[in-house]
Amino acid sequence: MKRIILLLMIGLLMGNVNSIQAKSKWISLFNGKNLTGWFVRGNAKWYVQDGVLVGEDGMGHIYTDATATDFEFKGIFRISGEKTNSGFYFRAVPPADNPDGFPRGYEAQICHNQDAHTGWLWKPGTPTGKATKLLTKDGEWFSYRIKVVGNKIQFWVNNKRVMTYEDDEYKSGHFAIQGHNPGMKIEAKDLVYRDLSK
């Protein structure tokens, strides 16, 4: 009898470990070949070139089909051209009254030419969580890591933590990338996330 109970306990423990491992597995958001798993809103043009997701030619957003609540995200980005301004959104949804408008959710800013620069947290139209330092510039690839659990939001740029903020307005939603101005280009690759929901 004791042996049966012991085996049952081991089985339950192994099941919990497998469940935790499944939740923490990194999931790719971009296959490097096409836009499968994404949908477009707005006027920006999105395409894949040499394994890189590219957006240009105006205002618009590309959303992942995937949604998340608590998660860790990693990606590589580059912005270039004129009046460069972009961002990586999370817990975001297209506004119901204007699907081509700015997402309702959080934005990890990508912009090197204004005070509220790359590494800042934005809420729609509003710089919210201040980055400690600007570590990037136009024309250069950089890494973004984002961790969100409950109301705690943290950003790392090039493996240096630059922003921590607490806010709970947006609970869950899509990931998205922003195209902002004609004449600029946003590029992204190696986009992965893992679910940290309990």
Image (cartoon, rainbow, N blue to C red):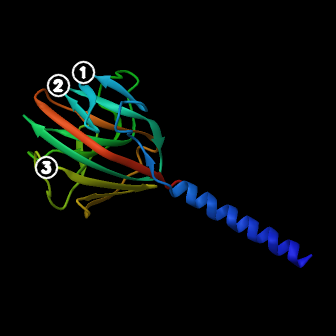
Residue located at (20% from left, 53% from top): 142
Q: Horizontally, is 7 left or right of 129 in the view?
A: right
Q: CA distance from mark 1 to mark 2?
A: 7 Å
Vertical relation: 24 (above or below) 99: below
Q: Quadrant of the C terminus?
A: bottom right
For the residue marked with disc 1, what is the amino acid? Asn
Q: Which mark is residue 140?
A: 3
Q: Quadrant of the N terminus?
A: bottom right
Q: Around disc 2, counting alpha carbons within 10 Å, would you say few (fewer than 14), some (14 to 19), or many (20 or more)?
A: some
Query: Which residue is found at the position 33% from the left and 41% from the top?
Result: 89
Name the residue located 8 percent from the left edge and 45 percent from the top edge. 113
- Disc marking residue 91: none
In contact (CB < 8 Å): disc 3 and disc 2:
no
What SS does tag 3 mark?
loop
Where disc 1 sits, the SS reads loop
Crowdedness of circle 1 by 10 Å Cα count: few (<14), some, many (20+)? some
Point out the tag, 1 or 3, that comes first from the N-terminus: 1
Q: Are marks 1 and 2 in contact (CB under 8 Å)?
A: yes
Residue 152 placed where, x, y %?
A: 39, 58
Q: Which mark is residue 43?
A: 1
- Label 3 crowd (10 A; few <14 / some 14-19 / many >=20): few
Viewer-proximal residue among 195 and 126: 195
Q: Is residue 90 visible?
A: yes
> Farthest residue toward the front?
50
Determine the CA span between mark 1 and mark 3. Answer: 25 Å
Amino acid type, label 2: Asp
Q: Residue beneath label 2, please?
A: 57
Q: Quadrant of residue 100?
A: top left
